[in-house]
Image (spheres, grey):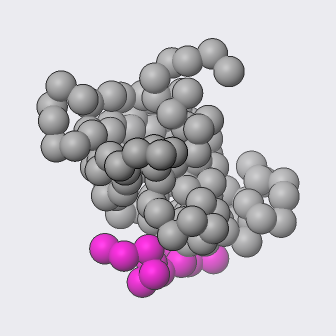
Amino acid sequence: MSLENLQPAPKAKVMVYLPYYKTNNQRSALPLAIGLYEKGNLEGERRIEGGKNIPFVATWNVSSLPADPTRCRLQFDGNADLSYETTMANYEFINFVIELLIIFKKYRVVDFSKGFYHKLLDVDE
C-alpha cells in the first residue's frame, strides 16, 4: 500500500477524534491519518543520517474510540530480535501517524518521528 493512494476516513470517524487535535496541520492531516490507522499496518524505513535506511514493518490493533489503548509493534530489518512494542491511547498514536504523514510529505520517506521512537524505546526526552 502506497501512502500516495491512501483514502481519507469518513467524516463521522474524523469528528470523533477532532477534539484531540488543536493545530491546523493536525486537523488537515487527520482524515488521512485515520485512514492509515484503520489499515493496522505499515511498511517504512527508519531514516539514518549519513547511513543506509533500515526497513521496518509496523503493526497495531485498531479501535474506534480515541481513549482506547493501541498496542503498536515495530520489527526492523525483518529480524525478530529487532522487535519493539509500546502501548498508548489511540489519539496519541494517531498523532504520531499524523507526524509520519508530514514527514512523508517533506522527505518522501515513510518514517515515524523522533518522539515516536522515544516512546517506543522508552527513552526520556
* Rendering quarter of residue 119: top right
The residue depicted at 73 percent of the width and 60 percent of the height is 26
| Residue sitting nearer the eye, 46 or 20 | 46
Name above or below for residue 115 compared with residue 107. Answer: above
The residue depicted at 63 percent of the width and 16 percent of the height is 124
User: What percent of the width, then of the height, locates residue 94?
Assistant: 57, 51
| Residue sitting nearer the eye, 101 or 22 | 101
Q: Is residue 28 toward the left or the right of residue 32 in the image?
A: right
Name above or below for residue 9 compared with residue 100. Answer: below
| Residue sitting nearer the eye, 62 or 43 | 43
User: What percent of the width, then of the height, locates residue 25?
Assistant: 77, 65
Name above or below for residue 20 compared with residue 105. Answer: above
User: What percent of the width, then of the height, locates residue 83?
Assistant: 26, 30
Residue 88 visible:
yes
* Rendering quarter of residue 90: top right
2 drawn magenta: yes
Q: Residue furthest right?
A: 23
Query: How many numbered badges does the structure rendering display?
Result: 0
- Which quarter shows the N terminus? bottom left
The residue depicted at 47 percent of the width and 46 percent of the height is 50
Q: Residue furthest front?
A: 50
- Which quarter shows the C terminus? top right
24 drawn magenta: no
Residue 14 visible:
no
Magenta stretch in the rendered image: 1-11
User: What percent of the width, then of the height, locates residue 82?
Assistant: 24, 29
Name above or below for residue 43 compared with residue 70. Answer: below
